[in-house]
Amino acid sequence: DAGVTQSPTHLIKTRGQQVTLRCSPKSGHDTVSWYQQALGQGPQFIFQYYEEEERQRGNFPDRFSGHQFPNYSSELNVNALLLGDSALYLCASSPVYSGANVLTFGAGSRLTVL
Amino acid sequence: QQQVKQSPQSLIVQKGGISIINCAYENTAFDYFPWYQQFPGKGPALLIAIRPDVSEKKEGRFTISFNKSAKQFSLHIMDSQPGDSATYFCAASIKRGSTLGRLYFGRGTQLTVWP
């Protein structure tokens, strides 16, 4: 059973560009959350999607947007990239009515902004 | 503002020793406290978690101690092994109805276990 899969695994962009990261949740999971993990730091919550709607949002600017598709997969879009957006972006999935002990993280997409 | 404060930043322990990582929080609404383990190039993986109605939870060599009045919780790794070398994160969350809320993570502790 595949866990959470993310693509691409690594990418390099320049300032001002836009990026789209993709996430396929674990089978049976319908809720997707995105986290940003800067080097040497803990993950920071960006937002959570359920039933194709943003349900919760962390303290991130509007340059960060997302989408969830009917098959529960999700995209994270970041516009007007800044150097400070360089980080590991983690996707996590879970069934909506679940104990938190089934929250599963992917391996992440490593974004470098030059 | 860091909602969950974690210490130490790094920890070196000899094989067979006890590793102890501490976390503190301020928001008394938190009702779920997990610990995650992360290896290089991997995402965080849930190690063990506790709810505030118990003071201790043990799973194998891993134990969480929880002090509700002090708003502190800690992870103890008994008989530490070189394979335990990883970064450990504490976290906290507020359950929203029957669904999991966002996780607030500590800054992480890099554990190195020497053989």
Image (tube, rainbow, N blue to C red):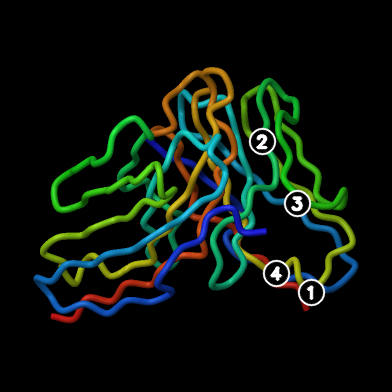
Q: Amino acid at mark 3?
A: Thr
Residue at image location 57% in from the left, 56% down from the top: A43
Q: Dot 2 lies on which element?
A: strand
The span from disc 4 to disc 3 (Cα, nearest Å) is 14 Å
Q: Nearer the viewer, mark 4 or mark 2?
A: 2
Do callouts 4 and 3 point to residues on the same chain?
A: yes
Side (left or right) of B57 relative to B105:
left
The answer to whether mark 4 and mark 2 are in CB contact below 8 A is no
Considering only order in the chain, which callout, 1 or 3, is on the residue closer to the N terminus? 3
Of A31 and A110, the residue lying toward us:
A31
| Amino acid at dot 1 | Leu
Residue for badge 4? A86
Kindly give the residue lying farthest to the front in the view shown. Answer: B69
Q: Residue at x 37, y 64 (%)?
A: B39
**Crowdedness of circle 1 by 10 Å Cα count: few (<14), some, many (20+)?**
few
Q: What label does residue A48 carry, if any?
A: 2
Across and down, in percent, residue A44 comes to 62, 54
Where is mark 1, residue-wise?
A: A83
Cα–Cα span, label 2 and label 3:
16 Å
Q: Earlier in the sequence, mark 4 or mark 2?
A: 2
- Compare residues B35 and A27 and report the one nearer the observer: B35
Q: Chain of mark 1?
A: A
* Within-10-Å neighbours for mark 4: few <14, some 14–19, many 20+: some
Q: In 3D space, how far apart are the residues under numbered discs 4 and 2 (Cα atoms)?
A: 20 Å
What amino acid type is highlighted by mark number 4?
A: Ser
Whole-number angstrom distance, CA of label 3 to CA of label 1: 16 Å
Please give the name of the residue rendered at 14% of the width and 47% of the height, measured from the top-left corner: B60
Return the mark for residue A20.
Answer: 3
